[in-house]
Each structure stands twice: as C-alpha cells, then as structure tokens.
Image: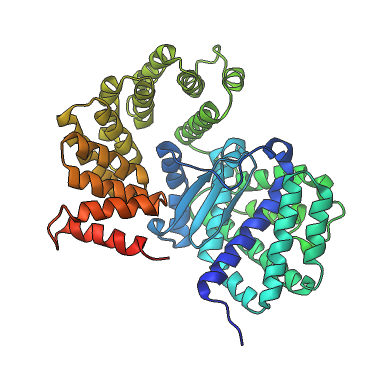
Amino acid sequence: MISIPFSIHRIFTGLLMLAMALVSAAPAHAAKERNRPAGPQLIRDAEIEGLMRLYTRPIFKAAGINPGSVNVYLINDSRINAFVAGGQRIFIHTGLLMQARTPNELIGVLAHESGHIAGGHLARLGHELESASVTSIIGMLVGVAAAVGGAAAGDSNAAKAGGGIMMGSQGLAQRNVLAYQRVMEASADQAALKYLTASGQSAKGMITLFGKLANESIASLQKVDPYVMSHPMPFDRIRNLEAAAKKTPYYNKLDPPELVLRHQLMQAKLTGFLEPATVVFQRYPKTDSSLSSRYARSIAMFRKGDTKNAVPIIEGLTRDLPQDPYFWELLGQALLEGGDPKKAVPPLRQAVKLLPNNGLIQILLAQALIGTGNRAAAQEALKALRLAQKTEGQTPAVFKYMAIAYGQIGDVPRAELATAQAAWLTGDKQLATEKAKSAQGRFKQGTPEWVQANDLLNFSGRD
C-alpha cells in the first residue's frame, strides 16, 4: 500500500478547499481581475486586524476555540469570499470587508468559518481524501484548478473543460468529496447559528449576505448539477437558515453604534488605500463631513503626495476622537511618508500609548525614530522593535529596522545578525548565510547571539 505523508495530505486538502472556494466566487468580478498578478496578495493593517479580533472574540468563546490558536489573514481581492485553509487559518477577502454592509453580516461569515474550525472539517476532509487514490486526488485538483482558471479568466470553455476532467475517471471520488463538503458547509451554517445565538447576536446579517450572493449567482446556477457543488444550493440554504434564525430571541437585534462606526472606518480606510483617488472622492465627497468620509479622503490625499492638505484633516480626526489610536497612527504615517520623520514620532508615540501591545504600530514608530538619524532615537527604536517581536517575530521588517538601528549606534555584530534574520525571513538564503557567518565570528561562542547565528547557518544549509 502506498501512502501519502500527512504533510502532503494537508497541502492537497488546503489546495482543494481553496480552489473550491474560488470556484464559487470567481465569476463575480472576473473581468476586473484579469491583469492582477498571480497569487494572493496578503495585506497587514493594525486597525482591521484589531477589528477582526473584536468580531471573532465572542464567536470563538461560544465555539470553544482558543483565540490565540487562530490566525486571520487579509487578502487584497475584490471578490466576496472567506475560507479556512491550512489548519486554523481564516482568510478574508477585502471584497467581503467592503461589501458587508453591517458588522453583523461579516460576523455571520466569521461564525460560519469558525464552525469549520471547531468541527475539525479540514482534518476530516483529509480523511475523506485518504479513501481516494492518489491519482483521483491529483485528478480532482487538476480539474478544480482548470475550472478556477477558466472562471477567473471569463473562459467558459476552460471552466467546462475543468469540470470534464473532474467528471472523468475520478468522477465518483470527486462527487464523494463534494458530497462530504456539502455536509460540512451545512454543519458550519448550523454551528454559526448556534455561536451567534450563544453570544447574543443576530443571524440576520449572515442570511442577508448569503441572499446577496445567491441573487448574483442565479444565472450561473440554473443548469448546475447540485451533486457537483461544494456548497448546498443557495436558496435552500437560506430558507433553512432563516427558518431557524427567526426562532432565536436576537434575530432583529441591531449592531451597537460604536461597532458600526468602526466598521465604516474600516471600509473608508480600505477605499482610501486600495481605490484610485477619483473613486475615493466620488464615494466620500467634501460635502460629507463624517469621520469615515474625512478618513478616506485624507488617506487618498497623502497617497498621491498631498501631505500638506491631508495632515490638517487627520489632525481634526484626532481632535474629534482622541482615544482612537489608528487616527494617531495615520497621522504619523502621513508625516513619515511625507518626508518628516521627526514630526511623525509624537503622534506614533501617542498611538503606541493607546495601543501598547500592537507590533505593527511599534514597527512604524521605530521606522520614524530611525528616520531622524538620532542615536538616542535609534536606541528607542530598538526598544520598540523588541516589543514588536512578541507579536511580529516572523515579520522581516522587525529585523530590517533592527539592523539599521544597530548600525546607527555602531553595533556592527548585531546589525549583521539582524540582517541575516531579515534575509532568512524573506527567503534570501545566500544573504542570510553570508551575514550569519559574519555575525557568528563576532560573538563569543555559546552566547545567545552566537547560537542564533549558528541556528540560521544550520537552517540555511538545509535543502
């Protein structure tokens, strides 16, 4: 008997689930996506990641999930989608963040994905794949990949060809796995309803969003065989959920106003950073003086180099809501990117004071401090970066700025070591080896720094 190593099973399973998720979402904005670079573009943002933690906290508690064991990733993609892959990892498209009209709609989707995690669906799907032959698994993956590629490119023939591959010699295995996944999706829906009720939240938002997706897919689903779907048929799914949700005491409960504001600010930030300035100013005109509108416009301004007009608007935001750390963070970022790191330091210090455990803001503060070229500021930057390591230890920027700061204070050995660590994290094995060797020769054998350099040499020497 030929077996596949567990790690390979996880790769296959993750690819299959990711591909299926993309199949269901690809047609919506296919024409806009044609010229995008291949592969998912992950984005980082302290504010949005903090909001996702706020949204998931009560859901994870209701599901019995340890929040520290789940990572949430943001993908820069305009399609409405979210999925679980590769273990306890939730991936969320920016399209979902932008199209979810209320926090409740987004929380409902996160509750559904939490149902997959709590139910161990990814691991259980791996067991289902174990019962199929290696050839069948590969055939399914090739077929799904072909269907995804065809749908994303707007090529219906390619998509049909992919379906044909899946319906060939591996058709039975593919149907079995899809049938199993439909059961998992229905189970995750019921789990989401349970978690939302247990945390005193409404399931109406989840049903509303599913309804929107169902309406968009009416034409494409008219002649689809329900047995080759990875999810339950949309309108059946919505009817079943709605009937159960209306029996809960929270069905008509509204989101708290403060949460709605944070949701609107998140969408304004995404618009400001991801959309062209013309789109931003159309969506958030000067006649709209709301916090979210000013937020979006100020971001668009400094992105196109108009720091002079952006800064007064952001300063107004900090006066109106001084306890919001992200307004201070944006003010510091605008000043830093506008070429004035010295002025950027005070607002970033205030952001860190309001949110002391956020590694991303610590890194931005360190960058501004380093930009001043001051030795004392470099020492402060190193302190901030060591704090950032607690949550961002795998982020190359931590070590990149450490290397610069150590260089500014004349600590060459540690600058070399930090450069090696940054290179290793970015995949530059040659530079990592070169700098680790140089650093190791400058430290006494057995010291923590010598051991770190030695570990890097051992890892970089592996194939």
Q: Nearer the viewer, residue 384 or 412?
A: 412
**Residue appearing at x 23%, y 37% in the figure:** 405
Report the side of 265 relative to 143 (left or right): left
- Pinpoint residue 199: horizontal percent, then vertical percent: 48, 52
Where's residue 322, x and y in %? 33, 24
* On screen, residue 180 above or below 232: below
The chosen color scheme is rainbow
Left or right: residue 37 compared with residue 88: right
Residue drawn at x 16%, y 30% is 375
The quarter of the rendered structure image containing the N terminus is bottom right
Residue 27 figure quarter? top right
Image quadrant of residue 373? top left
Q: Is residue 300 something one can see in this rendering?
A: yes
Which one is nearer the viewer's eye here, 324 or 228? 228
Residue found at the very far right of the displayed protein = 223
The residue lying furthest to the bottom in this view is 1
Q: Residue at x 44, y 54 (%)?
A: 71
Q: Residue furthest left?
A: 444
Question: Between residues 383 and 206, which one lies in front from this camera angle?
Answer: 383
* Residue lying at 34% horizontally and 47% vertically, measured from the top left: 422
Asked if residue 193 is positioned above or below residue 366 in the image, the reply reads below
Q: Quadrant of the C terminus?
A: bottom left
